[in-house]
Amino acid sequence: KLDLAKQHPDCVRIVTADDFDSGVTTVPPNVRGTLKPVTLPFLAKHKVRFVGEIIAVVVAPTRYVAEDIVDLISVEYETLPAYNDVEDAMKSNATLLHEELGSNIYYSDSFSNGDVEKAFAEADLVVSEKIATGRTSAAPIETRGVVASCNWDETLTVWSSTQMPYPLRTYLAFNLGISEQTIRVIAPTVGGGFGQKAHFFAEDFILPWLAKEIRKPIKWTEDRREHLLSTAHAKQCTMYVQIAFKNDGTIVGMKTKNIGDSGAYSVYPWSGLIESVVGNNGSPGAFKVQNVSYETIVAMTNKMATGGYRGVGWSAGCYAREMVLTKGAKLLNLDIVDIYKKNFIRKEEFPYTSATKQTYDSGDYHKVLDTCMEMSGYLDEKKLPRLTADGKLRGIGISFFVEPTNWGSRTAAESGLQGTLHDTSTVEMDPTGKVTVRSGQFSHGQGLKTTLAQVAAETLGVCIEDVVVIDGDTATGAYGMGTFASRSAVIGGGTIIRAATDVRDKLLKIAAHVMEANAADLTIDQGNIFVKGSADRSMTVAEIAYITYFDRFNRPDEDEVEPTLSSTRHYDPPAAYANGSHAVSIELDPDTGKIDVKRIFAVEDCGNMINPKVVDGQMRGGVSQGVGMGLLESLDYDVAGQLKNASFMDFLLPNAMTIPDIECAHVVTPSPGTEGGFKGAGESAMLSIHIALSNAVADALSEYDGKLVPMVTPIGPQQVMDLINNQTLSDGALAAKRI
């Protein structure tokens, strides 16, 4: 009922689903394989499927006034069953969230490679467990926000805290039914994204639509409660994993059933299946096991939709596999590092095609693991008694990961998702020798502008101070798919290497003509062009750039070289797989279950590094978020579908007191297929730190029972006490049998 609200003197407009006519298209479905199309409405109509779904929009001069007007709106609801547990929602008698689908399951798939049943039949040990990863949120410091303005010439300017300015422009043109050239999207300085802002939500459409309707600039910013309620959640999967071993620790087979809880919708553009599909495609991990099968199921519950968040798919999928490996190691009286070293793909075996048809390009997994073990003193720590002098239990855990990076079209395909994910960049040198890079990538806290400027400077041979990077504005940049999925340095850097090489080659050709030398005999360093072996014969880049643009008598003929120093290049790279290892030492209080993280070690191989300090920053940030996933973060719903912890008072995040100093190291194996030999680094640090934490807990609890292994994230005090009290030791376990 809107009558009272509309009578408020400051009410500018109230919008409901009834205001959208047939000319406005709802979010198009993201369809892959057997995925049933799911319509994600901009505003709920007749049915609300989760707490936090938008049913109306109030426009007023200030947010305070708008919230007062909201209080005048009344809504009548008929209560429906709320499904919190995804396996309850999958039952045949469950109430349907979307009647048109005929089921709450909207995606299913299966895969098998090798002779899986024979491998399990001949195994010495089969370990089977149910593993559950908690629901979490990226929770960037800056929440989402949109400002939209319809200009006098009918063009639309949209400022958005998005990771994907160009795709957002395309999305708006499609849904508003207007030409893309009439829309300008600007992503100003964005305070963190982590994949969560690489989606398009209802507000991204509604604000521009309203700007055109009311002919005034309009602004919306999300508060923290709205963010935790209504911005993409992540990581929640229920996984049934079986791994078959020989007595010496050789892995001979794997079976995985991954059930994804996508919430009430399939969020655009990545869809709700991204967590489970990507996780299952990576199920073999770093190991030489070819007898692999998996089943993927994605179903809907009455929660906010899930989407991409740093390490999507792999952080949940890796956890499930690795904890079963740890359990197997304990049952075989081995250490997890024995399992790793026995089954790793060896350096000389690259490129290696996994059972799930992912082509790992390069790596030295043994060296990475050995480096982490040496840094952390893993073997020496293992020799110490678990019980400390003050009654605490010490533990050390280690983990390993491999991850697909530089998400172009081929990486996406290898991970089970189809899409075109190329990028472009333009590199231009002006008459003064200064360089402007227009990138399709977009920096939102990763130090990306510095990284891309460094790539351009090193390729051209100029000083980094002479390079400016323009990004985040569709009117001034170059078309790109956005910044996400460990792709920016590889794809953005690759386009810049190609474009800058074109400019450098032309610059040298013109300099050779001016200096009466052979281009092959010239080199550029720090903005100066030298004749090799003749230090006294040199000119500055600025001098040659000026001649290129303005001195037609000294430069080559235009038929030979065009008088401009600019190039735009495209890049859609092959897949490149980063890898790394984490180790964590903890102390655990057996009376309370409290875990105190003492030291953290991180080793990563991301190929050739453009800027090691930037990579270290990415590693430390990712580790911190992984500690949150491993120990603290869980978005919890009650039986009525209400989010119980929709504030930072209750949704726990790691802080400076939780995270000790993180010691970083690197092993470099360049990717043979990418420009610059780069691999991605943005997500890797979050992929196994939570595994190392759970392994550290298992090590500490070996004082009680050498077979206790956590099978859930987060692993907090209650979960620790449950393990100690042996109440959930076999919770959800299928079996662990010796044959």
Image (spheres, rainbow, N blue to C red):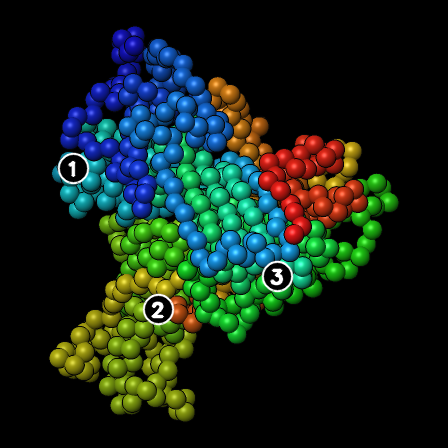
Residue drawn at (36%, 32%) of the image: 265
Which is more foreground, mark 1 or mark 2?
Answer: 1
Q: Position of residue 205 (x, y in %)?
A: 27, 34
Q: Is residue 172 above or below residue 90?
A: below
For marks 1 and 2, give the CA distance: 37 Å
To which quarter of the image does residue 49 belong? top left
Q: Position of residue 383 (x, y in %)?
A: 80, 57
- Given residues 277 and 394, the one toward you in this image is 277
Horizontal side, residue 86 vs residue 340: left or right: left
- Given residues 64 and 379, the one toward you in this image is 379
Instruction: Give the structural element (helix, strand or loop) at label 2.
Output: helix
Q: Which mark is residue 35?
A: none
Residue type beneath disc 3: Thr
The quarter of the rendered structure image containing the N terminus is top left
For marks 1 and 3, give the CA distance: 58 Å
Instruction: Give the structural element (helix, strand or loop) at label 1.
Output: loop
State the residue position of label 1: 177
State the residue position of label 2: 497
Residue type beneath disc 1: Gly
To which quarter of the image does residue 478 belong? bottom left
Which is more foreground, mark 1 or mark 3?
Answer: 3
Residue drawn at (29%, 54%) of the image: 420
Image marks 2 and 3: residues in contact by CB distance under 8 Å: no
Residue drawn at (78%, 33%) of the image: 591
